[in-house]
Image (cartoon, grey):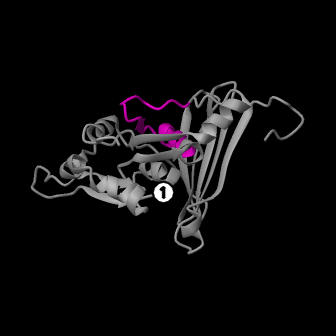
Amino acid sequence: MVIGDDPDPDLCVLVDPLDTTELAVRALHGYTHVLVYSRSLRRPVVAVVGDIYHHIQFYLAAHHDDGRDRASLVTRNGDAYPMHCGTSVAELNQALVTNYLMRPAERFEPLAAQRDFLRVLGAPSSNGTRRGRIGVDFGSVSLCHIAAGFTDATLEFAKGFAIWDLAPGHYILHAAGGTILSLNGQPLPLDHGLTTLADIADAMASRQKFIAAANSRLARQILNTIRPR
């Protein structure tokens, strides 16, 4: 839908006003995703993910006048902190890796079948302790949790995320220095190809499988253990 008098506006806005709706009505989780994409720059320029039930309420990224992307988080009382996850040295057998595994047949069973991934994640570290963990997370906020350093990685190989669930968190993680790969090992581009209304409609109908991590080494360690469906 085109809003305003300009028949060919530069900015494309993606909004998911209440993600994980079923959980939100139970007051468990609820996220708001907003992404502003410049068609002329062929990339996002602003993204905000609102985490409405927690102390950290906003994760955001913006493209600044100096050409750099910067990410930050904002707490309930208004304090803001920059996010830099690119210095992470997490290894897979020491990592907290999340997945949207709530649907038994569509998500949980495929994850449980990834025996190589689970074996490496559960392997002992150099001092003999088993520190690898698997957890559940949701949509764009899962990538924001990596950017903030709360988790180390997230993966989606079973069904794929829609663009409105992936793109805001993707941009925020990118701005924080993280890594996001397709399952063929290529970095996912910020250019979503939203050139025409037809391109935008095609993007809305597609899904993307990916691995996101705080550092590229961890992303590739996960990739090397995953057998795509």
Question: Visible in this render: residue 159?
Answer: yes
**Residue sitting at 53 percent across and 43 percent down?**
172
Residue 174 is one of the magenta-drawn residues: yes
**Residue sitting at 71 percent across and 37 percent down?**
12
Local crowd size for mark 1, using a 10 Å CA cut-off: few (<14), some (14–19), many (≥20): some
Magenta residue span: 168-190
Label 1: which residue? 138
| Nearer to me, 111 or 165 | 111
Residue 175 percent across, percent down from the top left:
51, 38
Residue at the outermost right position: 5
Q: Quick check: 214 left or right of 73?
A: left
Residue 229 is one of the magenta-drawn residues: no
**Residue sitting at 37 percent across and 43 percent down?**
214
Residue 148 percent across, percent down from the top left:
45, 51
When asked about the image quadrant of residue 162, the answer is top right
Which quadrant is home to the N terminus? top right
